[in-house]
Image (spheres, helix red, strand yellow):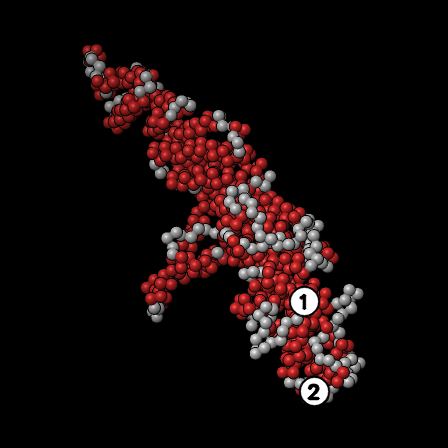
Amino acid sequence: MASRSRAHADTGTKLEQNLHVFQSDHFDADAFVQSKCHSLNEKEIRQLCSYLLDLKRASAEEMRRSVYANYTAFIRTSKEISDLEGELSSMKNLLSTQATLIHGLAEGVHIDSLSDVVPESTSDRSSTDEFREPSDLEKWLTEFPDHLDVLLAERRVDDALLSLDEGECVASEAKEKKTLGHAVLLSLQTAIAERRQKLADQLAEIACQPSTRGAELRAAISALKKLGDGPRAHSLLLNAHYQKYQFNMKNLRPSSTSYGGAYTAALSQLVFSGIAQAATDSLAIFGKEPAYTSELVMWSTKQTEAFALLVKRHALTSSAAAGGLRAAAECVQIAFGHCSLLEARGLALCPVLLKLFRPSVEQALDANLKRIEEITAALAAADDWELTHPPSVTRISSRPVGTVLGLTGAYQHKLSSSAHRFNLMVQDFFEDVGPLLSMQLGGKALEGLFQVFNAYVNTLIRALPGSMEEEASFEDSGNKIVRMAETEAQQIALLANASLLADELLPRAAMKLAPLANQKDDLQRRASDRQSRHPEQREWKKRLVNSVDRLKDSFCQQHALDLIFTEEGDSHLTAEMYINMEGNADEIEWFPSLIFQELYVKLNRMAAIAADMFVGRERFAILLLMRLTETVILWLSQDQSFWDDIEEGPKPLGHLGLQQFYLDMKFVTCFASQGRYLSRNLLRVVNDIISKAMSAFAATGMDPYSVLPDDDWFTDIAQDAMERLSGKPKVANGERDLNSPTASVSAQSMSSVRSHGSY
């Protein structure tokens, strides 16, 4: 999470820098385009357009993140404003009613309501006018309350709404034209308000009934909205849908399902279909008014959170605790599938699920990785480190191993038993974690698997003889019991395991985490874009290879120490072997020193073993031999006691010692060159060593070049030594034996090593 946060921060900083030029108040678009396109050709203009499109996409993504970051606060504020407006409206109505009542009481109105229908200007008419027929308005005022009561009793909602509207019109007109006395108008308004409230209560009761469905519910909510009580109507609509799916959930029990996926599917179908129907009804009745939209979003979020808690309680928690990544992934995938359908209705609820599901899925992920590590460590304790082809068994997915790995026939690589099992579990792991890409767990999965692979490499390092004293440095490596690799073949098998997993098998399996390429793209475009599409995976593979390099270094250091030191701890490579050579040169049989003979024999033997173990991957074998040779020569270059004796010892280096030293170094460069593992670094170190020896000899006052034969003499002796030590026939006509194990490895990978930069 920290690395992803840093990546987002870096992306935001880079975007802000790129957009800085557009933020100026004096930005001139024409001048900007002219400055960029004045001397550009067509290709560069296309690149500029592509760059601007990338900026546009990055800006849109930044805006989207900003909106989501503040969306909850916006919804909460909108809801509070809506509630406040409703309360202010209620207070206004209450104050108006109280003012009217107080005004009427102050005037002392106690006369009969109908007598006030007669205008005051006619009060002085004769008494005979008191017995005239009531007018139509008087009759309507008398019948109106009873008529409304009948409509309400018969639940004729539409007619009642029309009558209430008619009453509002009459009251409004009478108030404007003053055709009704104040008491009569007040009585009419009171009758309308009471019947309106009674109708609203009836509609609310209808909406709360569990038996109310579909059109009847929408009609009741719509009528309640027309009465002017929109907030209450919207809340009742949402509650009705909630009660509906809650009622249906009574028949759903986790114990009645065979596994968590079935329970999740049934539950998500109920919940998200209920949310979808509520959103449809809300839009149809209330439109896109912000207050109602905000309430819908908050309500939907609450229902989604409740759903997520149920899934975690009855499905995810048990799967996560047991390391059941596949079961957890299935539950999450089902939930996200249903939830994503709501995006068409403007409800982006997947982030809510992501936040709530992520801890449980991470727990399952960690438990799964821990299981892989523990099983692999246990198998390493009994591994014989013999390389074999994949066992001909089928996996859980009912596909043969060779099919799953994409390897058939002769191209099936060989691994030891623990590495085969490790690879098999990794293949299953990536099949399980693939659906969780929507939860942004791809990076965590890669990091976790790297840690597991690193622990396996630590196990392989401990399997090297002589490394037991280093166990304290592997505190997090798990089970420390491991079967030792006694022979060189077994030790090289350790490297074959690690290199094949890091170079090919694990990166190939990790490609399941990469986004699928657009099917409309052609193969050429996909090939050219591959490097730019997966920088995270390229970096991950680089880390795997670096982990293997630790094993390679341990291997080379151990074998270099075996060559240089005896079992008693004495060095095979001392200054005395060169200083004490002065005497009769005629009695000396010129031949490379014993330690360099053993180095050549060891390299030849390892090359023969590697030729069988690294079929198709000879480049790794060449680099291994190169690293081992460099380790021995670097030790000689850095052995200060050796050079102190050569340069300042009691006896100076004589011309015979210098000649033997030069022959040894020439022998190293000859067999390294023949084996195609003479790197630039090795050649540089050898030349530096020769220069130091010649400088030590020159310090005695003699010219080193005057006592050394020409290079052909050293080359002939070195070539003869290689032929005698390898038991191969001599070189004829400038061609050497092609059956040499060194040649069989190096000839196939000459171009690979050159591309690696070793020549």
Residue 359, located in which quarter of the rendered image?
top right
Helix or strand or loop: what does disc 1 sit on? helix
Q: Amino acid at mark 2?
A: Val
Residue at horizontal 77 percent and vertical 85 percent from the top: 584
Residue 491, located in which quarter of the rendered image?
bottom right
Q: Find residue 602 and name its label.
A: 1
Q: Residues within 10 Å of mark 1 (few under 14, many from 20)?
A: some
Helix or strand or loop: what does disc 2 sit on? helix
State which tag comes first along the sequence, 2 or 1.
1
Disc nearest the viewer among 2 and 1: 1
Task: Give left or right: position of 186 versus 241.
Answer: left
Residue at horizontal 35 percent and vertical 25 percent from the top: 216
Disc 2 marks which residue?
Answer: 707
Residue 93: % across, % down:
37, 29
Q: Residues within 10 Å of mark 2 (few under 14, many from 20)?
A: few
Is residue 575 in view?
Answer: yes
Q: Find residue 642 and name its label.
A: none
Residue at horizontal 76 percent and vertical 66 percent from the top: 566
Q: How many labels sit on residues?
A: 2
